[in-house]
Image: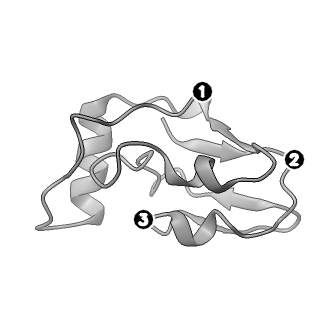
């Protein structure tokens, strides 16, 4: 499942540079997550990096875009052709 940014976002931009898939960008009033690119950092980090840097805890799981690990891996492979996934054993879903 992708993550989403809720309306408590203060548009500080801390999350944008943390995303290894370039899934986060500035929206009209808050930052937004492209669900087609968000892998919850699966294959790159052990946990979702954007959540860790958000000062207002405005990045939450997007229940409407739930995905299996297999779907996240397929998305990772499409976004990073030829790159082997890392940290999959330590990976945790966003809370």
Q: Residue at x 45, y 45 (%)?
A: 40
Q: Would residue 84 be found to the left or right of residue 78 on screen? A: left
Label 3 near label 1: C-beta < 8 Å?
no
Q: Is residue 58 above or below residue 81?
A: above
Taking the spot 87% from the left edge, 47% from the top edge, the residue there is 7
Residue in front for this viewpoint, 54 or 26: 54
Badge 1 or badge 3: first in the primary sequence: 3
Residue drawn at (48%, 29%) of the image: 66
Q: Is residue 40 above or below residue 93?
A: below
Provide the secondary structure element on which disc 2 rests: loop
- Mark 1, residue position: 63
Q: Nearer the viewer, mark 2 or mark 1?
A: 2
- Residue 31 spot, x, y in % from top left: 74, 62
Relative image position of residue 38 (x, y in whole percent): 47, 52
Q: Are marks 2 and 1 in contact (CB under 8 Å)?
A: no
Which residue is label 2 attached to?
7
Label 2 neighbour load within 10 Å: few <14, some 14-19, many 20+: few
Mark 3 sits on what residue? 21
- Of helix, strand and loop, which one carries label 3? loop
Q: CA distance from mark 2 to mark 1?
A: 16 Å
Q: Secondary structure at mark 1?
A: helix
Q: Quadrant of the C terminus?
A: top right
Label 2–label 3 contact, CB within 8 A? no
Is 29 placed left or right of 63 in the picture? Answer: right
**Earlier-in-chain disc, 2 versus 1:** 2
């Amino acid at each position: 499942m992708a993550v989403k940014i809720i309306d408590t976002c203060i548009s500080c931009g801390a999350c944008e540079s943390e995303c290894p898939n370039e899934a986060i960008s500035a929206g009209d009033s808050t930052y937004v997550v492209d669900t087609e690119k968000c892998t919850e950092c699966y294959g790159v980090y052990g946990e979702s990096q954007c959540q860790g840097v958000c000062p207002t805890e405005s990045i939450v799981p997007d229940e409407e875009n739930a995905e299996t690990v297999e779907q996240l891996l397929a998305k990772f492979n499409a976004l990073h052709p030829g790159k082997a996934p890392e940290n999959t054993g330590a990976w945790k879903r966003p809370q």
